[in-house]
Image (cartoon, rainbow, N blue to C red):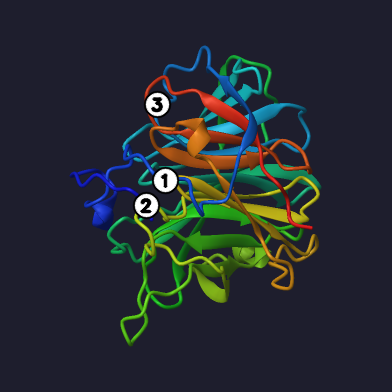
């Protein structure tokens, strides 16, 4: 059982739960090990570190974003916490930025994809994803020009904080919050897809339901999905909640889950995060980086077991 302290907080419909509550780690998975706490330096504007992704081309470089009500800015730092660049994202608006990832885009290059995908009240009929050519992370300030993809979900609005891009440029989105079916039963987290071709269609795209996770958001108070990321070899997917990481086997070409392989579950409680949000892979062996919202909050490096 999870131990909960009831209090008013910022988590939308989950206001009965305070993130700072202490939890019992029994049944929450294998505790993360080899934990390192890394202070970020020279990034005073990065105050709501809501997502993170590692560059596939620039060794040790990570990209991050602020949550809603902040300027549309892309940040970079490395695994030592050093500032590697700050860019204004021209042509974008930060309504509720919640996810950042890297993936292929036209011209045989990598792009950084920024998900303006949050919707706490599930009331927005249109959401947006921006992508920019991956900037060279050598420090300093600059700007990047964004391409915008407007989309909706085929079955109505959803709140999403987890997004990744497959080897073929498909954008995958995973729902965050509690959902119920027509009988009132809690549903698993839903997985939606936007094809790569949507970027050139010149109309609002529609995200289609393609799968679900064997996770049920809201089945426990802190089990809300706050980020996801593919491993560099695209053979595994990490999906995090506020206090756990689930590592799934995936098809490296399609990015889809391999449901024949049981996921591993890793407790992030040892990290002591005030509001755990982001997760990304540092290598293919389960070495991860996590972020938490808050002014001056450090990042963590930790290792979790990957599925056999």
Q: Position of residue 308 (x, y in %)?
A: 79, 58
SS at mark 3? loop
Q: Are marks 2 and 3 in contact (CB under 8 Å)?
A: no
Q: Label 1 belongs to which residue?
A: 24
Q: Hey, which quadrant is residue 267 in on the image?
A: top right
Q: CA distance from mark 3 to mark 1?
A: 28 Å
Viewer-proximal residue among 168 and 82: 82
Q: Are marks 1 and 2 in contact (CB under 8 Å)?
A: yes
Q: CA distance from mark 1 to mark 2?
A: 6 Å
Q: Label 3 belongs to which residue?
A: 47
Viewer-proximal residue among 27 and 73: 27
Q: Label 2 belongs to which residue?
A: 2
Say above or below: 192 vs 155. Answer: above
Circle nearer the N terminus (2, 3) = 2
Which is more foreground, mark 2 or mark 3? 2
Circle nearer the N terminus (1, 2) = 2
Q: Horizontal placement of 165 versus 67: left or right?
A: right
Q: Horizontal placement of 107 versus 295: left or right?
A: right
SS at mark 2? loop
Can see residue 62?
yes
Say above or below: 178 vs 180. Answer: above
Q: Position of residue 212 (x, y in %)?
A: 55, 72
Q: CA distance from mark 2 to mark 3?
A: 28 Å
Q: Position of residue 206 (x, y in %)?
A: 50, 72
């Amino acid at each position: 059982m999870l131990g909960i302290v009831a209090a008013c907080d910022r988590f939308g419909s989950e206001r009965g739960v305070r993130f700072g509550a202490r939890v019992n780690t029994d049944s929450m998975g294998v505790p993360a090990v080899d934990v390192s706490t890394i202070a970020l330096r020279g990034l005073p504007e990065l105050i709501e570190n809501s997502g993170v992704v590692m560059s596939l081309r620039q060794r040790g470089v990570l990209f991050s974003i602020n949550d809603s009500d902040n300027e549309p800015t892309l940040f970079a730092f490395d695994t030592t916490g050093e500032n590697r660049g700050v860019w204004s994202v021209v042509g974008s608006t930060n309504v509720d930025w919640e996810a950042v990832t890297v993936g292929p885009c036209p011209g045989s290059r990598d792009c950084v994809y920024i998900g303006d995908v949050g919707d706490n009240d599930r009331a927005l009929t249109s959401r947006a994803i921006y992508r920019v050519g991956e900037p060279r992370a050598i420090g300093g300030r600059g700007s990047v020009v964004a391409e915008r993809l407007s989309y909706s979900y085929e079955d109505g609005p959803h709140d999403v904080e987890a997004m990744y891009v497959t080897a073929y440029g498909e954008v995958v989105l995973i729902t965050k919050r509690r959902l119920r079916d027509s009988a009132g039963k809690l549903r698993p987290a839903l997985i939606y897809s936007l094809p790569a071709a949507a970027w050139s269609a010149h109309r609002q795209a529609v995200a289609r339901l393609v799968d679900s996770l064997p996770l049920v958001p809201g089945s426990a108070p802190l089990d809300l999905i706050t980020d996801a990321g593919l491993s560099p070899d695209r053979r595994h997917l990490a999906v995090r909640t506020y206090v756990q990481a689930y590592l799934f086997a995936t098809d490296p070409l399609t990015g889809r889950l391999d449901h024949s392989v049981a996921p591993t579950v890793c407790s992030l409680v040892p990290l002591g995060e005030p509001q755990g949000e982001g997760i990304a892979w540092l290598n293919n062996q389960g070495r991860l980086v996590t972020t938490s919202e808050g002014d001056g909050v450090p990042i963590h490096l930790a290792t979790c077991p990957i599925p056999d």
